[in-house]
């Protein structure tokens, strides 16, 4: 009799999740579907189990692994000093194809990121992966489930081709919806930095982050969300006058115009239609929208006084937008 043990690799779905969770907890490897590509998982708390990933894949020992969690409650097991922006990013993009590099918590094995004090974390958006992590109640370290250097697997069959007889179980969740690996974003640098591009694009990140450095070294800035939309526009034409002289030259009785500004500005308008917003910035801000609402019903052209200086930044932002200038 031959006593060489040949491992049989099982492939299945939800019915194998309990078994897969037990295998992980006992230090074995399990491959599982995620929405990006299939992962080759091990218990992230167990250094010996993680070493098996490197062996099975033939992965260079200095290439760190992504740790998968099922919700943000698990984050404290994996990372420490988590910045508020990380929670914000998770809220926006998770579960999903975004991996965040954070400071590593000592509770997980340093083998996930040899020679680094960081950890890459993500919440995969696939019911099988989430169920597996929940059942196992541990974070799962998992690179893509392919032999190092070969194509990433997007089906259970592709995993089987690389790991038949080498792992006990593959959780088959069908063809991966995204099909490329997650975007990796480093949050341990001054400016969040994309280390690997993926489905979540820089423009998506800029909806949450003020700045992002792309993997090509380009620094991108967010406009404040919403600034791209038309804002504060009255129903009638609205123009800025840089001083009283310009206001008077823009004014034309035939155009049914009105000048709107501070009380001093209005006083200098003579007999022209004019409405005062007040004589200090607080009053001017307070009265601005109400006054424009009234003016748009009575007149056909609004001429606004330009205010100068840092104190006037907020009112000028609204006024310029009313004039369609930004
Ligand atoms: O979509 C994915 O991210 C898939 C699925 C299975 O989740 N996983 C995946 O893992 O692509 P892998 O090992 O093939 O790629 C991990 C990437 C590598 O580029 C690695 O260098 C980077 O993440 N990475 C992991 N930990 C890191 C860390 N602490 N600091 C910087 N980069 C890290
Ligand atoms: Mg890979």
Image (cartoon, grey):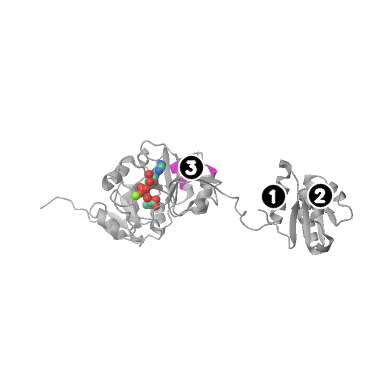
Residue 164: x and y in percent read: 24, 55
Helix, strand, or loop for circle 3? loop
Q: Report which residue position mark 2 lands on.
A: 245
Residue drawn at (37%, 60%) of the image? 176
Point out the stretch of residues depicted in magenta: 74-84
Instruction: Between label 3 and label 1, give the one nearer the viewer.
Output: 1
Q: Residue furthest left?
A: 1
Instruction: Between label 1 and label 2, give the one nearer the viewer.
Output: 2
Query: Label 2 to label 3, Cα distance in Å?
Result: 52 Å
| Front residue of 141 and 213 | 213
Query: Label 1 to label 2, Cα distance in Å?
Result: 22 Å
For marks 3 and 1, the one nearer the N-term is 3
Q: Report which residue position mark 3 lands on.
A: 187
Helix, strand, or loop for circle 1? helix
Q: Is residue 35 above or below residue 59?
A: below
Instruction: Between label 2 and label 3, give the one nearer the viewer.
Output: 2
| Front residue of 93 and 276 | 276
Q: Report which residue position mark 1 lands on.
A: 317
């Amino acid at each position: 009799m031959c006593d060489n043990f040949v491992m049989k690799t099982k492939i299945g779905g939800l019915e194998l999740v309990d078994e897969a969770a037990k295998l992980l907890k006992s230090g074995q490897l399990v491959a599982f579907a995620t929405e990006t590509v299939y992962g080759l998982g091990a218990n992230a708390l167990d250094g010996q189990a993680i070493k098996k990933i490197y062996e099975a894949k033939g992965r260079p020992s200095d290439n760190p692994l992504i740790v998968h969690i099922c919700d943000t409650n698990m984050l404290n097991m994996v990372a420490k000093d988590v910045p508020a922006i990380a929670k914000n990013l998770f809220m926006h993009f998770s579960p999903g194809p975004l991996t965040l590099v954070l400071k590593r918590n000592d509770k997980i094995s340093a083998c996930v990121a040899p020679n680094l004090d960081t950890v890459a974390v993500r919440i995969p958006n696939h019911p099988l992966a989430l169920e597996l992590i929940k059942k196992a109640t541990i974070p799962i370290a998992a690179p893509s489930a392919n032999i190092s250097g070969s194509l990433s697997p997007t089906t259970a069959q592709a995993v089987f081709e690389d790991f038949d007889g080498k792992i006990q179980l593959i959780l088959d969740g069908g063809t991966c919806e995204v099909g490329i690996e997650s975007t990796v974003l480093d949050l341990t640098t001054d400016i969040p930095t994309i280390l690997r591009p993926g489905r979540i694009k820089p423009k998506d990140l800029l909806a949450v982050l003020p700045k992002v450095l792309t993997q090509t070294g380009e620094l991108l800035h967010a406009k404040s969300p919403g600034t791209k939309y038309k804002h504060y526009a009255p129903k009638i034409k609205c123009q800025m006058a840089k001083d009283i002289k310009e206001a008077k030259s823009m004014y034309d009785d035939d155009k049914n115009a009105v000048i709107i500004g501070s009380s001093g500005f209005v006083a200098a308008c003579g007999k022209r239609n004019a409405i005062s917003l007040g004589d200090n910035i607080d009053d001017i801000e307070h009265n601005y929208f109400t006054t424009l609402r009234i003016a748009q019903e009575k007149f056909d052209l609004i001429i606004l006084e330009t205010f100068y200086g840092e104190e006037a930044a907020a009112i000028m932002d609204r006024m310029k937008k009313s004039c369609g200038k930004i």
